[in-house]
Structure formats: structure tokens, C-alpha cells
Image (cartoon, helix red, strand yellow):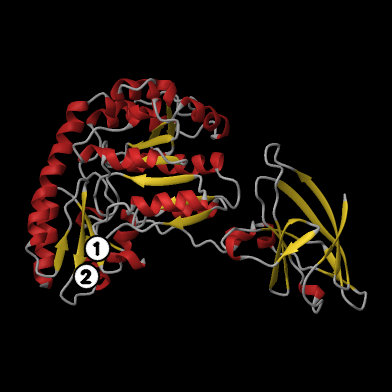
Amino acid sequence: MWRKTKVKGAFENPSNLQFVLYITRCRLGVRVLQPQNNLFLLKISKQMDAITGSSLHMIKFNDEFSFSPSLNKISSSISKFQSKFSCMASSSSISSAAGVTQPLKLTGDSFIRPHLRELSPYQPILPFEVLSTRLGRKPEEIVKLDANENPYGPPPEVFEALGQLKFPYIYPDPESRTLRGALAEDSGLESEYILVGCGADELIDLIMRCVLDPGDSIVDCPPTFTMYEFDAAVNCARVIKVPRKMDFSLDVQRITEVIEHEKPKIIFLTSPNNPDGSVISDEVLLKILDLPILVVLDEAYIEFSGLDSKMGWVKKHENLIVLRTFSKRAGLAGLRVGYGAFPLSIIEYLWRAKQPYNVSVAAEVSACAALKNPVYLEKVKVALVQERERLFKLLKQVPFLNPYPSYSNFILCEVTNGRDAKKLKEDLAKMGVMIRHYSNKELKGYVRVSVGKPEQTNALMDCINRLS
């Protein structure tokens, strides 16, 4: 199909021409064939959405933008779409006003999707090996309280199971049947509702890939787990932020307004929330579930809250997904095992889209072994909850720290009395004690301390007192 489209603005520098395409529920391939004055000949191949049949195009020319619901009519309004990500197409050569063909220079990054070239990488916590080198200390000399890991590690059955692996050279079960069966017994939810991933992080990305079209929106409620915003950017989605209130509770009224007017597809909620440790009440969750949006409830820290998981709710709420992990509860952060409970109407499509061998043999064997010792898991949980209460009382006594009550295995502290939160983190690191500092605006003056063993709490408080 050939279309001739007039573009607003003067045709001043054809060699710098870029054609930028925004996609809404359709796939569109575009090729710039020949600029002629202010006219462009475009060859278009498109497959329209069978339901809406809608598409949206945008042309970027000399830094001027025009949007069009069709290629016949150009609109100058960009405010509604300014945060959408673009897919870019260009010709292998383009003619200048003098008629001389100028080949475009080919570079490796020209193959990368344009929105990924602007993506800031996720900032993970440094592992023991790197910390050891940077701090000049042995790993066992470092008090690591910056990543909410379980300091007690997994049950002894995990080490035994790993030492007895018989077939590590055979691909793992793509359906993780043994583990899903064990999780069904552990949770009381039938295995057909359960999907296992390489950490809950993989499931967050998988959900987005299955639900979001480029340009769709999610709702994020900062401060919270930053992986939601990161994965949205990777998946070419727009993030609508509804900040939490001063006490870190959700702004339900504002969430409702955003969902009504912006029509986002997914909202991500964390309970207990990382980094403050607050929980979402059943009343609030039910209000949000009544809204026309897919609710992803991240329960990575639910074991430390004393509350029941909402996994069973997916059987009666078609718009609810619940995510869990073995990283905190079972001390398997290094083996990457997460899982989720999904309505049957949703899980079918995640099965189709997931990588076939996403959970390794070692990971599945370890998770199954951990579930065989619920007594150990309960004992470790109780120890961490008790240490959390002790740590909170000790931090409360520090004149420049204001700790927040937590239902998780960490405590968020506001740094007060003119102290600098980043410097506090750096000073403790020099002493071999690692805590988490945040650079984002919501938490610039805060630090987060993971709950460790009693001796780790003692080392932390000794260093803090030396800085007082």
C-alpha cells in the first residue's frame, strides 16, 4: 500500500531524517522511500488489531513532532503520548536536496531497539566477592545487611540434595511438576494455578510481556520495589506513578482516579512493601480489585508479616496475580526460585510465552528439599522476627535515626539531626557493615537495614555508636 503524507515543518536537513513509529495494538512496518519537498512516500505493511483496528503514528522531523490516527490526518498534539516509547525505522540510504545518495553509517547499536539505548541499567546489590575485593576484607568478615537475604541460609536438606544430583546434564522439567506439586501441598492451592520462575523477577517480566503492548501503562506506587519500573521500561511501557502517603500507605483515591482516566493495564502492589515494611489491608486490596485493572500482588516477604498469603484469592478474582519467592523464606536467593498463583484464564497464556527450561535442575531440587523441612523454615522465621523487634528498639535509641515499624525482615530508617544518609552508609561500609542507601527523591534521606543474626545486629550497633 502506498501513501503520500504531508509533514508539518520545513524540509531543511534530509540527511538527518528519522521516522519514529508509536504502536497501539497493531504492528506496523514503515520504510521511507523518497523525500520530495515536504512530501514523503512511505511503503507501509501493517497488521491491524482484529478488535480495535486502531493504530497511532508519529513522525519526528527536525525535532518537530506530529501524531496521526491515520496517515491522512496529522495532529499536532503530543502531550498525551509524550512518554510512550518509540520503534524506529530508516532507509539504508537517503537522497539529499542535491539528489546525491548518502549511505547511512552502520554501527552495532543501530540494531538495538531505540528505547533500550536510553535505558538506565538496574542497580543491583554487590555480591560478597566484589565487596570483599573493594573493602579489602574476607567475605566472612563483612556484615551484609543491605539486600534482605536470609542470613541463616537454607535447610541442611538442600545441601544434601545438591550433593546427590544424578542428572545435571539432562534438561530440567519445563513444567517443574515436582516443585509445583510440593507448592500445592505447602500452600493449599492446586498446582494448575501455580507457575514457577527463575526468581519472581522473571515472572514480573513475563507478566508484562504477556499483557502489555508497547505504549501501554502500568501503575507504580513508590517508594517500592524498583524492578516494576525497570521491567516496564524494558517492555516499552509507560509508568504512571502514584506516590504513597507520608506513612507509606497507598493513596487509594488517587489510584482510582488514575485508573479511571488513564486506563492502565497493571498495578503492582507489594505487601509487605519494600523498603518500608508496611502491609496492605484486605479492605484496601478489595477496593483495588474492584477496579478494571490487573492487580499483581508481590508477597516476597509475607512470611515475616504474620498474615496469610492471598494465593487462594486467585480462584475468585480473575484480575489478581500473587507472587512469592524462596529467596527470603528459604534462603535460596542465589539459586533464583520464585513462583506465582494465577487465575486459570491468565496462566494458560503465560505457559505459552515462558522459556521452556527457565528453572534449573539445581533450583528445583533445592526448593523441593527446603519444603521438606517446614520446622527449620518456621524456626528461622521466628528467629528473624524476634531479631527484628530487638533491632528496632536499638535503632530507636540512636539520636539521628527514626526507624519505621516493619512487618518484614528489614527496617527503614529516616536519617535525621542533619546527618547525611549516604555518608552514613559509606562510613559503615568502611567498617565492613553494609546497609542500603537510596538515591531516589522519595528516599534520599533514608537507609534500610536488613535483619540479621544477633551477632550481626551487635556489630552494626557497635559501628553506629562509634559514629555517634
User: Seen in the image, is 232 located left or right of residue 51?
Assistant: left
Q: Amino acid at mark 2?
A: Leu
Observer-nearest residue: 390 or 77? 77
Q: What is the number of the mark on residue 424? A: 2
Q: What is the number of the mark on residue 447? A: 1
Whether residue 462 is situated above or below residue 38 in the rendered picture: above
Residue 117: where, in percent of width, then height? 59, 62
Is there any visible trace of residue 346 in the rendered image? yes
Whether residue 96 is situated above or below residue 312 in the rendered picture: below
- First of labels 1, 2 by sequence position: 2
User: Seen in the image, is 71 located left or right of residue 318?
Assistant: right
Residue 399: where, in percent of width, then height? 9, 69
Mark 1 packing: few (<14 Cα in 10 Å), some, or many (20+)?
Answer: many
Mark 2 packing: few (<14 Cα in 10 Å), some, or many (20+)?
Answer: some
Location of residue 372 (image quadrant): top left
CB under 8 Å between callouts 1 and 2?
A: yes
Residue at 17% from the left image edge and 27% from the top image edge: 375
Q: Judging from the image, what secondary structure is the residue with disc 2 in? A: helix
Q: Amino acid at mark 1?
A: Val
Q: Measure how far apart labels 1 and 2 are at the Cα level.
A: 9 Å
Residue 346: where, in percent of width, then height? 50, 30
Observer-nearest residue: 64 or 135? 64
Q: How many numbered marks does the figure carry?
A: 2
Whether residue 251 is situated above or below residue 39 in the rendered picture: above
User: Seen in the image, is 453 located left or right of residue 68?
Assistant: left
User: Seen in the image, is 410 located left or right of residue 444?
Assistant: left
